[in-house]
Image: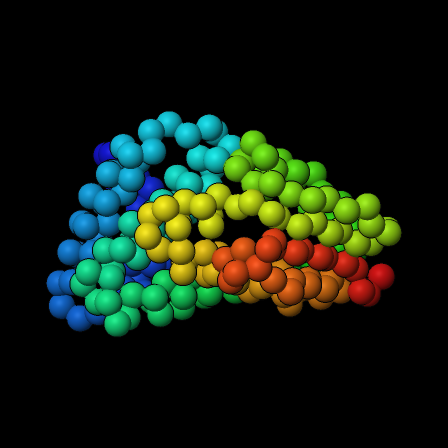
Amino acid sequence: MTKAEKILESKTFLKNEIEKEIPGNKTARVWQKSKEKLDTIFTSYGELPKGIAAHTDSFIFPSAAIYLSLKEEAPDKAFEIMKNSMKEKSMKTGESLAKMTRIPGFKKFFLKMWDSVSRKMFGETAGFKNVFYDCPKGEFRMDITQCPYNKYLTELGCPELTQLFCNNDIYTYGNLPGLKFTRTKTLGTGGDCCDFKMEIINK
């Protein structure tokens, strides 16, 4: 099994949405084209640093390959299919996280964890550039001024997908009991940064 095939196996939520929206054997053609495009993308970009590859290989490149293949087979439905499937998956993640947030003490743990996790997973070694702010207790803030999602999706000819990844944060973190997630702009929608604020509102 090739690297592309293995990664696409984890994208069944997208494949299922395609099958619902596109009749006949088009789904099989989309999936075959996606594999071919993903193979080509991996060849074109070679071996990226581990931190960046954690985002490109699992999320950015396969999403681009599937979307570009969808545009060839169903151009009028491609963006909506990606939007709906990504939204549904992120909302399920948010629902699971909301259950954990109700556990006593979890909100404080979650907020503290965000600082260390964001510096590692969304720091410079992962292709991001950030501004981290000193915040009062119970609050976390950062701005992302450079983003590999925006960079690589633009290079691959589908910058419009960036906003869907931005929206994933809203669906995942926007309805957590006792926590407030605030974002006013993103790079993917033309802003000068992605501002990110999480704060405890129910102590």
Front one among 186 and 90? 186
- Classify residue 138 as left or right of residue 55: right
Place of residue 73 in the rendered image (x, y in percent of width and height, measured from the top left): 18, 63
Q: In the rendered view, does 46 fall on the left or right side of 185?
A: left
- The quarter of the rendered structure image containing the N terminus is top left
Residue lying at the far left in this picture: please name it: 25
Q: Residue at x 60, y 41 (%)?
A: 129
The quarter of the picture where the C terminus appears is bottom right
Q: Position of residue 27 (x, y in %)?
A: 20, 60
Residue 3 seen in render = no
Q: Is residue 78 left or right of residue 136?
A: left
- Left or right: 177 as drawn, with respect to 148: right
- Residue located 64% across and 65% down the image: 184
In the image, residue 94 above or below residue 134: below
The location of residue 112, given as percent across then percent down, is 76, 45
Q: In this orientation, which residue lies closer to the viewer: 103 or 52?
A: 52
Q: Hey, which quadrant is residue 5 in on the image?
A: top left
Residue at the spot x=51%, y=32% of the render? 51
Residue 145 appears in the rendering: yes
Residue 190 vertical position relative to residue 112 in the rendered view, above or below:
below
Residue 57 is drawn in which quadrant?
top left
Q: How is the image coloured?
A: rainbow
Q: Position of residue 195 (x, y in %)?
A: 65, 56
Residue 174 to residue 197: above or below? below
The structure residue drawn at horizontal position 29% and vertical position 34%, both measured from the top left corner, is: 44
